[in-house]
Amino acid sequence: MPVQHNRSMVSMPKAHREAGKLLAILESASSARVPAERQTHCVTALAAVARARSLLIGTVALDEAGRADLLGITVRALLEVWYFGVVALLGDDADLQRLEDDHRYWKNALAEALPGVEPDPGSTATFSVFARATRADELLLSIGEPAGLAVEWYRELYAGESLSHAHAGIESLSPYVVEAADGSVAIEAEPEVDEGLRYGRIRVATILTALLAKWTWERVGLDAAAFDELAGE
């Protein structure tokens, strides 16, 4: 099946060279051979890679625009996509059903709140992000990847970014409040973000995208070797 790209690679400053290399690799793919018996799994994973690519581009663009205070939001969203893609790619048909049931559960809950919207028929059940992380760990272990990685990222990255950036609260709002030497308080519209934290988030976004792409490429007949360095292997 064709792998389509709707925009050219964005130009990257040297600080973002690894993300730029990854985008170039992703854009070099022209077609994939999806195994018939795994078609839905592979197509879903390819879509997840495309979504991760967009979030990586968005993460870099935010940093380039001076909005490093928002990077945690896009990285957290990318990790969600990573869990979805890993479970879809490596899991069985029951995993795909769990993802579909969870989608229908929340879609129907929304339908109940909106007059005139009919719920979708079919089974419903929640499949939380933590449950997806746990399942991803099981699946990654089955292909020889280190145990505990997906759950560790959930606890340290997903939960951490939820508190510090994704949701409104004391932690996410505190960088915008500054106290002067005289004790007066002001609102800072352009808060400083530690450079190590900034580029750490871009590096994580690159690694997540590279890993998902590597595992997907291996299963659809594309050359995955180019991802090894970017995925930290």
Image (tube, rainbow, N blue to C red):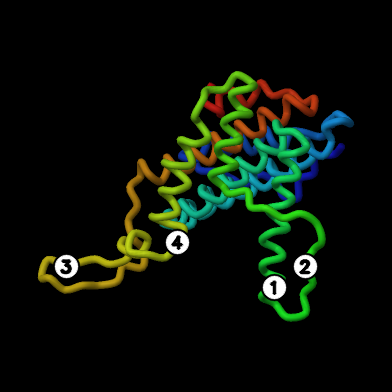
Q: Secondary structure at mark 4?
A: loop
Residue 26's x, y, as percent?
A: 69, 36
Image height of 98 relative to 168, above or below = above
Mark 2 or 3: the one toward you: 2
Sequence-wise, the earlier of marks 2 and 3 is 2
Q: State how many labels appear.
A: 4
Instruction: Measure how far apart labels 4 and 3 are at the Cα level.
Output: 27 Å
Residue 231's x, y, as percent?
A: 56, 28
Q: Which mark identifies residue 123?
A: none
Label 2 environment density (alpha carbons within 10 Å; few <14, some 14–19, many ≥20): some
Q: Which residue is mark 3?
A: 180
The residue under the point 65% across, 36% down is 86
The residue under the point 58% across, 47% down is 80
Tell whether label 3 touches label 2 (CB within 8 Å).
no
Residue 58 visible in the current orientation = yes
Instruction: Measure how far apart labels 3 and 1 are at the Cα level.
Output: 49 Å
Q: Which residue is mark 2?
A: 119
Q: Which residue is mark 1?
A: 112
Q: Amino acid at mark 4?
A: His
Tell whether label 1 touches label 2 (CB within 8 Å).
yes
Label 1 environment density (alpha carbons within 10 Å; few <14, some 14–19, many ≥20): few
> Where the N terminus falls, by quadrant?
top right
Q: Which residue is mark 4?
A: 167
Q: Amino acid at mark 2?
A: Pro
Instruction: Measure how far apart labels 4 and 2 are at the Cα level.
Output: 28 Å
